[in-house]
Amino acid sequence: MKFNYYAFKAIYLHEMDRFRRTLMQSLLSPVLSTSLYFIVFGSVIGGYVQKIDGISYGSYIVPGLLMLTLLTQSISNTSFGIFFPKFNGTIYEILAAPISTLEIVLAFVGAGATKTLIVGAMIFLTATFFVEVEVKYPLLMIFLLVLVSFTFALFGFLIGLMSSNFEQMSIIPSLVITPMVFLGGSLYSLDMLPEFWQIVTYFNPVVYLINGLRYAFYGVSDFNIWISVGLMLSFLFVCIFLVTNLLKRGYNIKA
């Protein structure tokens, strides 16, 4: 079957236009939150924690805050993007059009990932106003940012697809992702934890993502970089498998 570029473009541009209409809300909230993190954690706590692995505390938390933004934004952007058409009934217009499930997924996930990368770029620029940010491996950083954005945008699509109401859709981002990021070494080094909690954090997959991004920035990490990349690719394939199978069954999307 020939790829329907025009159908893909229509959905993609519609989602990006929705982002444009709420631009201030979409960008202002993450930027303000990041600024507060740097003011509170970077300035106040940074006064007590001088350096970690030879890096100033304010600079050290940049990859963690960036990862927090990527995970939450990519999930919320895409989950809301697919849930709203289900909620107001316009999903049936999409299903009635000559467009395949592949094109639907690529359009929603692509738009969600694009919005996330735009917000991520703003967070990165905001960080440079507060601390000195060094990127030792820029190509690796870009690769990881794109990979994380698309993977968790796909995960967000899965959440929006399976959710029947707004409460169900908000459970995973608020009760799972955010705590995992804060417990994943986003604001501290794992060496600073007691031995028991260090062992516990090894079972937190977000730890490896944050360390992978931190390695791209400063060349320091608690784990091998390939562990981070391997886990990210594995999770991507799991999401692709689940979304593909659910869409083939018409789960929660086709009448």
Image (spheres, rainbow, N blue to C red):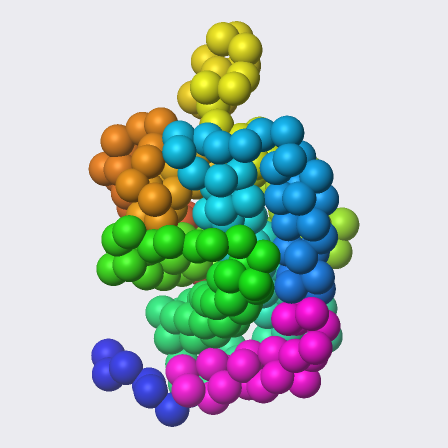
On screen, residue 2 versus residue 15, left or right, reads left
**Dividing the picture into quarters, in which one does residue 161 lie?**
bottom right
| Residue placed most toward the observer, 169 or 198 | 198
Measured as percent of width and height from the top left, residue 113 is found at: 45, 66
Please, is residue 185 above or below residue 158 in the view?
Answer: above
What secondary structure predominates along the stretch shown in magenta? helix
Residue extent of the magenta highlight: 8-28
Which residue appears at 54% of the width and 58% of the height? 127
On screen, residue 206 versus residue 76, left or right, reads left
Residue 41 lies in the magenta-colored region: no
| Residue placed most toward the observer, 255 or 167 | 167
Measured as percent of width and height from the top left, residue 244 is found at: 38, 56
On screen, residue 135 versus residue 31, left or right, reads left
On screen, residue 105 versus residue 90, left or right, reads left
Q: Is residue 238 visible?
A: no
Q: Quadrant of the C terminus?
A: bottom right
Please, is residue 46 above or below residue 28 in the view?
Answer: above
Which residue appears at 69% of the width and 50% of the height? 39
Spot the residue most to the bottom: 6
Q: Quadrant of the N terminus?
A: bottom left
Residue 17 lies in the magenta-colored region: yes
Please, is residue 162 above or below residue 198 in the view?
Answer: below
| Residue placed most toward the observer, 237 or 215 | 215
Q: Is residue 107 visible?
A: yes
Which residue appears at 33% of the width and 85% of the height? 4
Q: How many marks?
A: 0
Measured as percent of width and height from the top left, residue 26 is found at: 66, 71
Which residue appears at 54% of the width and 32% of the height? 50
